[in-house]
Structures are given as structure tokens and as C-alpha cells.
Image (cartoon, grey):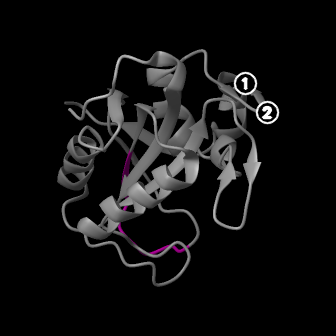
Amino acid sequence: MASLSEAPASAHLAYVALGANLADPVAQIRAAGAALAELPDSRLLRLSSLYRTAPVGIRGQPDFINAVAALETRLDPEPLLDTLFAVERRFGRHREFRHAPRTLDLDLLLYDQRVLDSERLSLPHPRMHLRAFVIAPLLEIAPLCRIPGRGVAAAWLPAVSGQAIEKLGS
């Protein structure tokens, strides 16, 4: 794992959603978890189980494999986002159109309890509370997680209960 100095005051807690539905998505997500463990100035704290979900938006594409990672990082939100995009590119990600099939999608969900709305980044992720593929793995690794402006993440389970999601075995 990448090292993080012993200065906890400068470390931040970030949650990242991982998703893939091309090129052996189970292997992609496992490899992406390993890549997150190597991020500069960061440390992978936890990686959820893998979950299979139907695609959102465009139908007729393969199911997605999803997970959520908890990171301790000294990177600020936008440099962390840039680093995540670099990992996506390394995995062959092309941003052709919204909801397109992908080899890897990394979304910065939460960064401490920060609220941010810039041209490049919105924190918390604006639709995270409406997606079973985010809420289920997030609650697995952070059952007491709070979403700024939305409250306890577990309170959103009823809102996503109609979305098909399957936890995969190891």
C-alpha cells in the first residue's frame, strides 16, 4: 500500500465508488482495488464486497460489478479526482457518452463531510443516495456513514430497495 505519514490531522477520509461492465468486470474491480491501494499520499482502509447490478440509463449493456472503497488521503479533493481519472485511463476508460459501458468508473462519493459544487466536482456525489450500487457497499464498510445534507446513509435504503442488486461471493 502507498504510505501515508503519521500526521493524522492532515489526513482526510474519502469514499470512492468503483464500477465496471466490460473486459471481465470482476477482475477489473479487483485490480482497481489494488490500484487504489497504491495511490500517492493515500492508504486504502477498506474495500467492500463486489455487487452485481443492472445498468442505469442505457439498457442492453452488460450488468455492472460495483464496490466502494474507503481511503485515507492527504490529497485535496480535486487532485484526488485527477488521480482517480488517471487510474481509469490506465484501465482503458474512454468517456464517450453518459452511461456508456466502461472498463472502469471511479466516482468520488464523499470527502470527509465536505460539501463542494464546482464545475468539475460535486461533493457529496449528487446521486449517491439514489443508487443501490453505492448505498449497499458503502453501508457494508461504513454502517454509520453520514451523507452531508442527506443524513445517515442507512436512511436511504428504502429509496433504493426496488433496485436489483446481488452481493457476490468471494
Q: Which residue is mark 1?
A: 155
Disc number at residue 150? 2
Type of amino acid at the residue the image marks with label 1: Ala
Specify the quadrant of the image occupied by residue 109.
Answer: top right
Q: Main secondary structure of the magenta part?
A: loop
Q: Is residue 65 magenta?
A: yes
Q: Can you say whether 161 is above or below 99 in the image? A: above
Question: Residue shown at 47%/50% (left/top)?
Answer: 80
* CB under 8 Å between discs 1 and 2: yes
Q: Can you say whether 15 is above or below 65 in the image? A: above
- Secondary structure type for disc 1: helix
Judge by depth and name the residue closer to the eye, 115 or 139: 115
Question: Residue shown at 65%/40% (left/top)?
Answer: 160
- Bounds of the magenta segment: 58-66
Say which quadrant the N terminus sits in.
Answer: top left
Question: Residue shown at 21%/42% (left/top)?
Answer: 34
